[in-house]
Image (cartoon, rainbow, N blue to C red):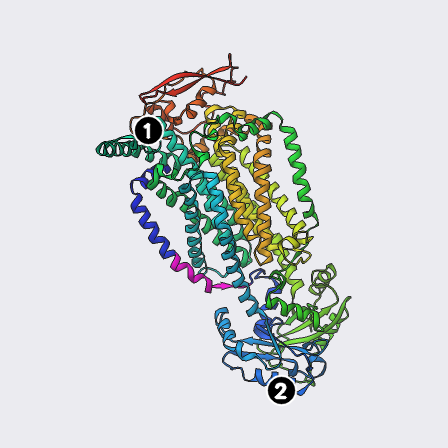
Amino acid sequence: MLSGLGRLIHRRRWTSLVLILVMTVVAGAWGLGVFSKFKEGGFEDPDASSTLVAKLGATYFGSTNPDVLVLYTSDTLTVDDPRYESAVVTTIARLPKDQVEEIISYWSFDGKAAHSFASHDRRSTFVAIKLRGKDGAAQIENYHAIKDRLAVPGLRVQYGGNIPLGEEFGKQVVTDIVRAETITALPLLILLVILFGALTASFLPMAVAAFSMIGGLAVLHVVTYAADVTSFALEVVTMMGVGLAIDYSLFIISRFREELQRGMAAQGLPQGKPWKGEADKAARKAAKNAHRTALKPVREAALAATMATAGRTIMVSGITVSAALAGLLLFPQMFLRTIGLAGIATVMVAVFGATVLLPTLLALLGPRVEFGRMPWRRPTSKRAQRDPDSGFWYRLGHSVMKHPLPYFAVVLVILAVMFGPFLNVQFGSVDARVLPKDSPTRAVVETVKKDFPNGSAEPIDVVVSGDLIPRDWTPSGKGDPIPPYLEQFRKRLAALPGVTEAQYTGYSGSYGGVRISVTHKYEPMDQHAQDLVTKIRGMSLSKDGYPMHIDVGGSTAAQMDLMSSLMKSLPKMALVVGIATFILLFMFFGSIVLPLKAIVMNVLSIGASFGAIVWGFQYGHLAGLLDFTPTGGVEATSMILILAVVFGLSMDYEVFLLSRIREEWDLTHDNRVAVASGMQHTGGIITSAALLFLLVIAAFSMAGITVVKLIGVGMFVAVVVDAALVRSLLVPATMRFMGAANWWLPGFLAGLHARMDLRERAVLAPSGGAVAPPRLPDEQPFPYALHWEEAGTTRSQARPASQANAVEQAPWAPWADGPPRPRPPLASHTRRVVVPNPDGSGWHWGEEDSPA
């Protein structure tokens, strides 16, 4: 099917290009609208008790975190000075009522109640403002309408609160993306030129990456109509879209160049522009036309073969990455669910760009993909002429095959050491400290915490509600009666160990509830604070036998609810993602051992990544290098996000490596040779893909938001560990241990796999009458068959067309003719190879020296 798609794209390449360009323009115009649709937050469990308390506070009791917090500071006056009061009160009294719903200031209270609104030196105070507006966009609009009217002559003014904080967060996200793309564009291009060795080939991945970014924005905009989307998703989607697009492009372009060169060699077509040697203009034109005519079927066959191999692998990889991201949909947090949706869509856009846009460009370019060839890619260079069996990755594969135990032991020790810090992980919540140190809204939060009496205290909010709370009970003064059972409950709260104060901070007659804020002497995530929340949740309140509802909120309770929710959903995610990944890999590799081993290998990469995150962010060892403020913990939802993304990326490289090893195994049934040859063909490409992806991630690790830095570092470490240790050393070592058991498939599953097989059964031979080499007798050892490919032919050319078609149509059955015979030892130090005749008319046997 995919080979047919490749031929269709080649034949309709101009139509395909026009349609893609139109699609890109429309997607770009549509995608710009996403920036006005972002929501803030989304880290909480919507069904948790703490979330209900927060919603009740915002709706009925007044939020403890106001929409806008205006901090006023004087160098000479104190808040008790009439001039200070007159200047502030007059200013806020003039704010339009259609934009401001509520204003609370130092002068709104008498006596002790006003104490928390004045700083220790009494020269600073803050005003809490609740804005009108049905949604965040309307509130932001109202904020900008009143912002300039909040200035007071003679006083310094700073702005904080939910609205300014969320707006700055969104702007920082866009700034980070622009900076990351600016920083990485030139280094990416340079690295691509080094890897591809040709200018034209190097620009193609950048085009696919740009398409993926534009498509990702458009898809993200669509997601906003199905669910709330946090602005944080923009960074993750961009990071994944660009990284995967470049990785996928690397595999497609490398395979196309390989197939094109093989096809041209099979047809005896010279590389370059042979018509330049003709002196006569007419002869040059005729030679040029003849060359183009002869090249057309070769180019089409090369694209078909590329789609049937690398294209198929990329599609399976995209589905596997999407399956890992789909695990995020099982969590109730909006932050994870929307990133899961947007991430899946972005992966699909990257796959589309690599399997439709890129083949379209390759069909148009053909051999011109080599334009601007660098010296190290020229046929005369030593690198271009080296023996495939002498490559670094081939030698490394054989080395691991010979000494699997030392490699296995050393890698496991390294991974265990890296995982160690994760045993002491402490999870924390997101606060203003995730913003850069020079952030104005962060400065307001830190000033209030440092200079105000209750600034550092984060109370536990307890909401009592039920039928026994009179709906017409609205105390408005000091002498209003308080129901005795409520007062007794408040005193019980105040008497708890570690509690410094418990006071009424909100009431609502329409809702029928009361909020009591419990202030304590502990840090929010201290174990004593968590024990206090647990004790309060275990308390009961009733009158005359009728129970009351008690809901507990605040930052401590919210973090506890978040962790409880994540721990409940994590096993479901692991089960669903594990089963989906196993089924996909079973369909692709025809083995039940390889999928299980792949999942275990990915878990090892993730464990090393988590350990590095704890070491760098919780312990603060990377704070100086990456310029962030350590908080003594790591954000839990970000770790879940890294788990899903890294699992998908690790499986990505696993699919690339094992798909080529599977090809070699189908050809040879020799485990050692299959692993070594598979590593030789993919080791350099996987390493190059990892380098390119690391370059993209490294730019995001320099982002202004600490959570983005954390995700960037986690993904960076995971990719390095996966490419350098797991995929290069641990996977081949374990495959050596298991030998032929790697490909074990019980008989009762063989028929099932034959109906589900995702692999291409055969690659069609290039059209145009290519002369196939003589078919080797069945008793010939493997090295001769391997050299057919190295001599410049496709594998399907090693058998008659009728036999190739029969293989395509018949279901695959492993070892249908019995187990493979062991390879006989070579009798001499020479080996036979198939060599094309100089005139391109056919093939002949040749011999070359083989290393002893």
Above or below: residue 722 compared with residue 337: above
Residue tagged by mark 2?
A: 86
Image position, residue 566 (x, y; %): 60, 54
Label placed on residue 88: none
Residue tagged by mark 1?
A: 269
Element class at badge 2: helix
Q: Which residues are magenta?
A: 28-40
- Residue at x 59%, y 79% (from the top left corner): 103
Q: CA distance from mark 1 to mark 2?
A: 90 Å
User: Quadrant of the rendered structure where residue 734 is?
Assistant: top right
Circles 1 and 2: CB atoms closer than 8 Å = no
- Residue at x 63%, y 26% (from the top left corner): 403
Element class at badge 1: loop
Q: Residues within 10 Å of mark 1 (few under 14, many from 20)?
A: some
Above or below: residue 756 compared with residue 268: below
Amino acid on which the number 2 mark rests in the picture: Ser
Dot 1 or dot 2, earlier in sequence: 2
